[in-house]
Every structure is written in C-alpha cells, then in structure tokens.
Image (cartoon, coloured by chain):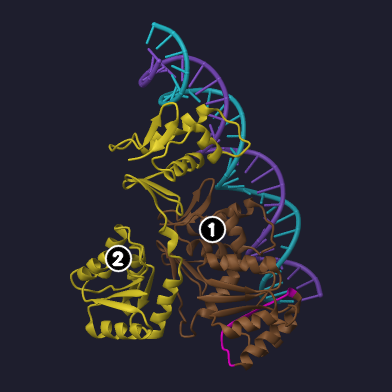
Chain colours: A brown, B yellow, C purple, D cyan
Amino acid sequence: MKILVVEDEHRIAQAIKQGLEQESYAVDVCYDGEDGYNTAANDEYDVIILDVMMPVMNGFEVCKKLRADGNHTPILLLTAKDQNRDIVQGLDTGADDYLAKPFSFEVLLARIRALLRRPQDVFGELLQVGDLTMNPNSHEVRRGEKVVALSTKEYAILEYLLRNRGRVLSKNNIMTHVWDFDAEILPNNIEVFIAYLRAKIDKPFKGANLIQTVRGFGYKIDA
Amino acid sequence: MKILVVEDEHRIAQAIKQGLEQESYAVDVCYDGEDGYNTAANDEYDVIILDVMMPVMNGFEVCKKLRADGNHTPILLLTAKDQNRDIVQGLDTGADDYLAKPFSFEVLLARIRALLRRPQDVFGELLQVGDLTMNPNSHEVRRGEKVVALSTKEYAILEYLLRNRGRVLSKNNIMTHVWDFDAEILPNNIEVFIAYLRAKIDKPFKGANLIQTVRGFGYKIDA
DNA sequence: TCGAAATTTTAAGGTAACTTTAAGACAAGA
DNA sequence: TCTTGTCTTAAAGTTACCTTAAAATTTCGA
C-alpha cells in the first residue's frame, strides 16, 4: 500500500511518514502543493494525504486538478481546526474525507483504513485476543458475550494494543499513537487509562487478564 | 501472496479459489482438515482460510494445532450461519477472524486484505542459544517451553549476551552497555545479576549451563 | 446557551518489585 | 597455602507502577 503525504510542515510530515512506515505502508512525502500534484500525477498511490494550507498550490487546488485529470485516488484533507467552514469546499473539490488538526495518529490510521476499505466491507475486520473482540466499524467491544462500553481514549488505546497483539508497547508509543502530535501528558495518565481499561475488560471477567504490564518497558495485550 | 483454502465442499472451495486467483493471489486447496494441517505446516502461506465443519479434523482443531506449532499465519474461519456461539471458541483457538456462511465474495476479499494489512513481523526476530529464546518484540524469554520472567536489568544483560553469542564480555562491557553512561556501580553488581540470571535460566533446567564464566575476563553465553 | 454528566488530566500516597551494597564463603591458579 | 577473582546471601535503598480522588475539560441534552 502506497501513500503520498503532501504537507509543508516538515515536523508533521516526518511524524506521519515515520508512523505510517511502521504500519508497513510505503510513504512518499512532498513539501508543497505543486510538487505534490506532479508526484501524484506521475505515480500511482492508494491514498493521498493533503494539507490544505500550503505554499505554491493549496490542497484544494491540488485535489481539484487531480480530479480534473480523472484521478480517483482516495484523498484525505488535513485542515486547521478553525477552517471547518472550508470543509464543504474541500469535499466539493472531490476529496473523500478530511481531518482537523491537531489529530492523533490512531485517528489518522483509522481514516486511512476506512479509505482503503471497499464499500462492500460493511462488517469489516475483527480484532481479537482470547475472547475479547473489537469491531472497528461498529465500534463495538465485547468480552465473551458481554458488550463493554469504552470512552474515546480507552477505545483508542485498546485498539492500538490489539493491532499490536503480543508486542510490548511503551508509554511513549501509546502517547504518540493515541494523543495529538503536540499533546503533552504525564506517563501517569497512561497508567490511569490502563487501570480504567482493566477495570472494564479484565477485572469483571473470570478468564485470564489480557492486558499485561511489562515492568520497565510498557504494556502488551495477549491471551 | 499465497493463500491456503481448507474446505470440504468442492463447489465452494473451487469458487473461492477461482475468485482469489482472479485477484492475483496464489491459491492452494485442501479438502479435509488433516490434509489442510499438513499442507499448512509444510508450506508458508500468507493467509489460511479454514472451514469449521470438516471431516477427519475440524477447523478448530487444525487452528489449535497450528498455533501449538508456533505457526502465526493469519487464519480466517468459515462458520455456518447458526454456529455463532461457536465463534468465541473459534477465536480462543487462535484464529484471527471469522466469516459466517453464506458470505459475499467481496466481504471475503475485504477480510483477507484486512488480515494481510496486519503487522506480520511481530514474531519476527528471535534471539537464540540452545533451547533458550528471546523475542525482543513480545519481550518473552523461554527456556524450552517454559516462559521465564526477567527484571529489566536481567533482561538487558541477557539480551546483550545473546546478541554477542560465544563472545566473552567483560564486566566493563556489560556495565557500559546496560547501565547509563554516568552510572557508577560495583563490579560485584554484575556478578549478582549473573547469579540471578543463572538461577532463572540455567539452574532450574537439566540441559547445559548456557552462561559461562571466563575467569579473569568476563562472561559469555553459548550452548 | 447553559448546566449536568461524562471524560480526561493531574496529583499524591502506597506498595511490591527491583537494584544496589556489603560482607563472608568459595574456588581456581600460582 | 595463599592470593585473587567470583559466588552467595541478605538487608537497605530505590523506582515503577497502581490506586484513588479531586480538578479541569469536554460533551451533550434541554
């Protein structure tokens, strides 16, 4: 899967590139609209991520031009928080989805997955460990038969753990994947959320505790 | 991408095979569980599609046996519509996803794509000496079948030894590699940790002692 | 738009696990 | 046998994590 990121802020562009590559996507980066347009026109990508505010040629223009060329690659627009009224315009230019900055990496990943998924895939994939299941489409989490209600952050952390089943994830990993790029939180915050998750998906059930602490390194989920 | 289909109903098996081949997957087919297990065990596949209801050996058994072998290939179970309550059991055996019959081909394709998107390298790297293994991703250390729990420092020292298998490492080497630059510890501290490690990975087991003292020089690990 | 409820964040105290130190016993080599 | 390096043991010191609760923030319905 090949993704093109067009974003003039190097720090953000690099963070996205690095994160996506860790998810084993192939990522190319362009730092302005014109370069982005040329790259997108010459190469085939599975998804294009376009920042709106950019020098030389903004995201809307790039998007419009690509569509005019008959290019149907799914496009995800990145907008600043207070540009919400521009979104309608953005989608009018032929973009498929948008995301307001700042956003967490997990949310970005989820949107990309959604764009890559075909419309027929109504039920989607199922993430599971032992008798714990998560349906990313319906957002439903179950332990055995019982449905478990999770808050946004709880859900995001659990999803991240499940998508890396068996692997130890540091608090830093969790922080950079679940929180906004520029968020600054205490490590203790992660501990608190892990405790919340355990209280909901482990403690009330007889079976093995799925969320495991690996002292000095982080946490992992495994049966 | 290579896919194994294990399904006793020839009509369905052939339909799946044909459809997947049109999507340019390489497809092998087995018509019963035992044959399926043997094929999966001998060949490397990217995804295994397993019918649950099968003669000789059912899908659950095949799945369980493959996982017991340490095979982590993504497995998609096919269940009959009214077997939903078996699903929990199915996922407990280590399957990654399931699909209730009858299903559309598009849904099957989407699920396969989802499975292929998963990070596969979670169980990739494995450090090994004799029957001692360390998985840096899951942080799991085993001697034979037995999982061994190590503290942070114990783990770090063992990892350093394993990455330099057969080479003699001085206490100073270990100190500078495992501790902070400015840490000041006694050489005796290393001896203590080596003793802890031996107590956990050598003493309780019949086989050869893996951690060896080289008097005057340091320690090495070797079979 | 306001207020209540839910969620997220911060903070502090407790605890078990881990690390370090120290001192005496032991073993190998001269 | 003596010296020196290593091993063992236990106690003291430290740290990472967990728990709890209150403060801050966000969400959402009236």
Camera-nearest residue between B185 and A84 = B185
Report the residue that reaches farthest toward the left.
Answer: B56
Q: Which residue is mark 2?
A: B63
Q: Which residues are magenta?
A: A70-81
Residue under the point 52% across and 46% down: A215
Q: Quadrant of residue B185?
A: top right
CB under 8 Å between callouts 1 and 2?
A: no
Which amino acid type corresponds to the residue marked 1 in the rendered image? Leu
Callout 1: helix, strand or loop? Answer: helix
**Residue A197 got which mark?**
1
Chain identity of mark 1: A
Which amino acid type corresponds to the residue marked 2 in the rendered image? Cys
Asked whether B166 falls inside the magenta stretch, the response is no
Within 10 angstroms of label 2, few (less than 14), some, or many (20 or more) residues? many
Chain identity of mark 2: B
Report the number of numbered marks. 2
